Image (cartoon, rainbow, N blue to C red):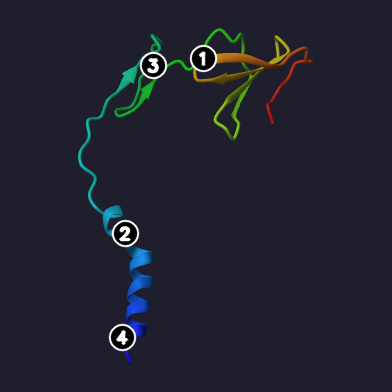
Amino acid sequence: MYFLPLSSLAYKYWKSYKGIWTANAPVPEAKKITANLTNLPLKIPEGYSIEIYAKDLGNPRDMILDPKGTLLVSVPGQGKVFAVFRGSIETVAGGLNKPHGCI
């Protein structure tokens, strides 16, 4: 008589909270690597790194990530918007009148 309600309650509890114990487990100590790969005089906090993602874009003004992970960069001085993805740089729009923003 009580088996069915208790089993359904136990199943609901298991579905809702089955990952809570691993989420609360202590995080093992990891090596905290600090790296500055830019050759610029920057002080990087412990555990962080910095590197150049794209260069030779001129004087970029605004950057935004699109939903697919492509970095869109507007360069008003050149009248262009560039797309930067996995190391390649392509012109998305050109001949613009000082584009500012990528929305």
Q: Which residue is rendered at x = 31% and y = 59% of the image?
A: 20
Q: Nearer the viewer, mark 2 or mark 3?
A: 2
Q: Which residue is rendered at x = 38% and y = 72% of the image?
A: 12
What amino acid type should be assigned to the residue bearing mark 3? Leu
What amino acid type should be assigned to the residue bearing mark 1? Ala
Which mark is drawn over residue 54? 1
Horizontally, residue 58 falls left or right of residue 17, namely right
Q: Nearer the viewer, residue 19 or 80?
A: 19
Residue under numbered circle 3: 42
Residue under numbered circle 2: 20
User: Is 65 situated above or below 6?
Assistant: above
CB under 8 Å between discs 4 and 3 = no
Q: Earlier in the sequence, mark 1 or mark 2?
A: 2
Q: Quadrant of the N terminus?
A: bottom left
Q: Nearer the viewer, mark 2 or mark 4?
A: 4
Q: Which residue is rendered at x = 56% and y = 19% of the image?
A: 84
Question: What separation in Å lies between label 2 and label 3 (alpha carbons)?
Answer: 40 Å
- Residue 76, given in percent of the width and then of the height, sits at 70, 15
Q: Nearer the viewer, mark 4 or mark 3?
A: 4
